[in-house]
Image: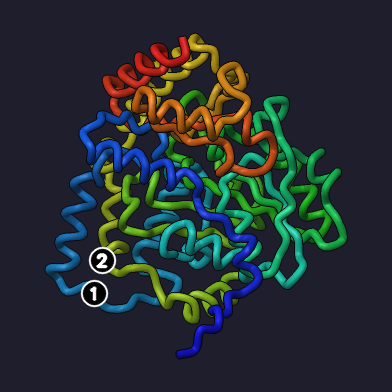
Amino acid sequence: MDKRAAHIARRMADIEPFHVMDLLARARRLEAAGRSIVHLEIGEPDFPTPEPIMEAGRKALADGHTHYTPAVGLPALRETIAGFYRDRHGVDVSPERIIITPGASGALLLVMAVLLDPGDQVLMADPGYPCNRHFVRTFEGEAVSVPVGPESAYQLTAEHLESHWGERSVAAMVASPANPTGTLVSADTMKRMLAFTAGRGGRLIVDEIYHGLVYDEEAITALAHSPDVFVINSFSKYFGMTGWRLGWIVAPEDYVRSIDKLAQNLFLAAPTPAQHAALAAFQPETLQILDARREAFRERRDFLLPALRDLGFGIPVTPEGAFYIYADSTAFDSDSQRLAERLLEEVGVAITPGLDFGHHRPQAHVRFAYTREIAELEEGVARLRRSLG
């Protein structure tokens, strides 16, 4: 029998797993053994998919909507999303520029594939969502991680782009609101970054998957500033459809045909029943449910944020959206991984250490996800106080 080692592409050495999954597995084992665990590590809404979407999905299956759609998506859904931009954001977007994808991850695969040649660089904030740099690496590009801190609300700025843009740079990527920090890119900063990338012949990619979950001000889509931006969105977070695996891109017009070709070859089309179900996501009844849930997330943030600050976590910037709090944990331990393991073992509170979000001071930070009801958040804070107070 041939005992030679399997050939694995060199790029795989640079693709890291989600380190928090090991912690989650440990938490599940503790639960199986009878321990009570407060889960503040999961970046998934605890609310079920709204019933109007569920009913539309059931009807799609009953009506036999189980065949392929066009690679760019169900025409009716593309038109509905265009109407959503018009009605909620006051922005006219042609349905032809909207490409439906298998989740935001599918959208990012398409955007990176259409933009990157080997060696091309994409600038992104550190800390940030870890998969972004792995998408770049998958297409033989280079992710340039730019250290950011509270002085810029943990976001890239035009000044960052000016300092780090090089001969091989072709794009910059931002998220507003961002994971893990929950912060926004201001309208002025967004406009300046768009002007900078356009002036260098590059592109700006904007992740807006938490866009419906903004609490203290009106969320402004990057499409309000330019038609030449790539916008990524998802049905997972605000719309509560994580397992349906559905997202979308709004692409500059010149890229649509190329993205269409890529989608045909990479995955053909997003799931058909999910696309039909998503048509109901924009109905007034559904939007009323979703906006009520946004208020529930706001209440959770408004409880957890001051409670964590009172415990001694350093949170210099108030998160304005998403459902995360990124906190300096050095008052308790110089190693956030060790702290997270200790809190799980001692008091049954699961949080995410900073290691998953980049290389800029990860050992000094942890992320809390307020994706649980306030009663559970209160219990988590009480347990943290017993351990840390």
Residue at x 48%, y 36% (from the top left corner): 352
- Compared with 337, 84 (above or below) is below
Kindly identify which residue carries mark 1.
66
* Relative side of 292 to 123, left or right: left
Q: Position of residue 152 (x, y in %)?
A: 71, 30
Label 2 belongs to which residue? 273
CB of mark 1 within 8 Å of CB of mark 2? yes
* Label 1 crowd bin: few (<14), some (14–19), many (20+), radius 10 Å: some
Rendered residue at 48%/31% (across/down): 340
Residue 288's image quarter?
top left
293 vs 58, left or right, is right
Query: x, y percentage for residue 339?
Result: 51, 27
Whether residue 253 is visible to the viewer of this picture, yes or no, is no
Classify 322 as above or below 12: above
Which residue is depicted at the point 38% across and 51% down?
235
Residue lying at 58% horizontally and 79% vertically, measured from the top left: 7
Choose between 132 and 333: the one closer to the eye.
333
Whether residue 277 sits left or right of residue 210 in the image: it is left
What's the colour scheme? rainbow
Spatial CA span between label 1 and label 2: 6 Å
Is residue 196 shown above or below 327? below
In the depicted structure, whether residue 169 falls above or below residue 173: below
Query: Residue 371: horizontal and vertical position, in percent?
Result: 36, 33
Could one spot residue 89 in this view of the protein? yes
The quadrant of the rendering that contains the N terminus is bottom left
